[in-house]
Amino acid sequence: MVIANSDSTGTLVSLDDNLHRNKQGLWIPTTVVPPPSNVYRKTALHLPNVSSVSRTSSTVSLVSLACSDSDSDDDEYHVSTYDDNCWSFDTHKNTSKSTEVLYLPDNSNATEGETLHVDKAIECLHSESGLMMNNLQLLESGKHRVYDKASSGNHHPRVLYVAQGEVGHTVPHQTDVLMSDRATTCHIVAFRSTSTDTEKEALSSICHIDGTSSAYEQSIYDLVQHHCNYHDNTNHAIEMDIHVLGGYADEHGTSVEISNWLMGVLADVADKYTSSNETGMTMTLQTCAISSINTTCTFHGRSEPIGRGFAICCKTGNVFLAKCDKSFVPAISARSSRLFSANSQSGLACVHTEQSDCITIHAFDYSHVKDSFDIRAMLALPDDLLLQYTSTSPDVEDKHDFCHIMRSTFRFLLQTTPAQVFGGSSNDCSLQLRRVKGTNTWKRCD
């Protein structure tokens, strides 16, 4: 398949002696030749240089961390303090443009049973490639840094949370950590761009993808265009880093369907924006821990996702696994309710931009939801049944957390109206929340 960079030609080549199919019909890298054009297509997504990736575990100096005392199999860290002077990780920023690019499976001529999935293709990258080393550094401990009520004071990083079906943009003077979590089959994508205009801060964005709609595709194009507009790309070259986490080897193939679609969209976006002389943009896929790459097996042989939450440090651009307590998310019931409304089909909802310090939840009409199914009956279900009816991956959800949020959302749908929450259901109405300065507490704007 795809892997190493040939110094003489600047093309992706593999490392061994031959190229053959395994039992699953997947091309395995065993020869030093470019990938066959009838199996893979070349994209404009650059891959990180091996020299720019640290081979050591990520030693965190961003915050002081204490191990969780919870019964969570040591898969969490709780944020305890924050040192404003040490926003760094034991990783290295790319300082030179990579000539290595990503090749994706081209299934246009594939016969039945020979479809090549993106995650399996990426798994065949050499273990010493920059992308696979970044994936390893992200996933190797499986530990998520936890943000909760104890992280709400003045001595903690300012966190901006983006929920399922949302997108958020921010810059370092507004936000320290931009994150999303609770992803099983969903995928979380982080973007961070810098330009040759040294007066501009880096712009970071995160979106939480739960499907493969054309509206979501347009939202991703809009997100990249937002970065171009921010940097005023007419006069300045833009470097954009992309990080993807999500999905696992679920038995229904829901994750891999999103992985295939999403990577295809990102490749198309890169082709468009890097081929245009107007944008001057280079897009680098720094991390891609998706589907089977993001899978671990339990002692019972069940597949589960390793990473479920993902955060990016807005100042440094480093990424890490993260999760937050439901009490830490502003207006979580209102934001979750949008997933049951018709507005959920209209693309990603933008909840924050670099132009405002407010979280803005634009009005959506959910009054019809009460008529579409019996909410009271759903509330009466035991947790196990509620999971089966409402989750795409009931066997691997955090049952208590998921069901608590779902019940809170159903009660919100049942007990409130759009007029009460937003002042109406028109596009001009919204719920706005402003951060209490220097904290992770948000108050409704008057």
Image (cartoon, rainbow, N blue to C red):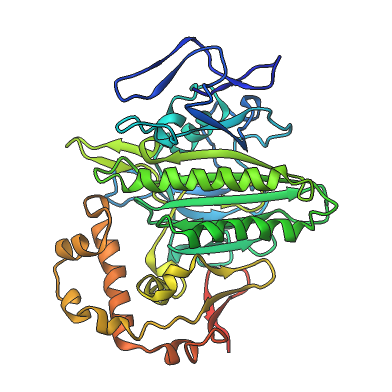
Q: Which quadrant of the rendered structure holds the C terminus?
A: bottom right
Residue 293 drawn at (x, y percent): 40, 35
Quadrant of the rendered structure where residue 200 is? bottom right
Residue 34 location, x and y as percent? 57, 19
Query: In which quadrant of the rendered view does residue 375 lie?
Result: bottom left
The residue lying toward the viewer, choosing from 210 and 114, is: 114
User: Which residue is at a point 50% across and 10% down the rendered structure image?
Assistant: 16
User: Residue drawn 55% across and 51% down?
Assistant: 190
Closer to us: 89 or 432? 432
Question: Is residue 86 found left or right of 186 in the rendered image?
Answer: right
- Specify whether residue 318 is in view: no
User: For residue 251, which quarter of the picture?
Assistant: top left
Whether residue 403 is situated above or below residue 343 in the rendered picture: above
Work out whether residue 400 or residue 153 is closer to the camera in this orientation and state it: 400
Q: Residue furthest right?
A: 235
Say how many tags the image has.
0
Q: Is residue 71 visible?
A: yes
Where residue 74 sits: x, y (%)? 33, 43
Q: In the figure, 257 relative to 214: above or below?
A: above
Name the residue rendered at 50%, 43% in the picture: 263
The image position of residue 95, as x and y in percent, is 73, 34
Work out whether 442 lies above or below 267: below
Q: Is residue 352 left or right of residue 38?
A: right
- Residue 194 lies left or right of residue 3; in this view the side is right
**Residue at x 39% of width, y 35% of height:** 117
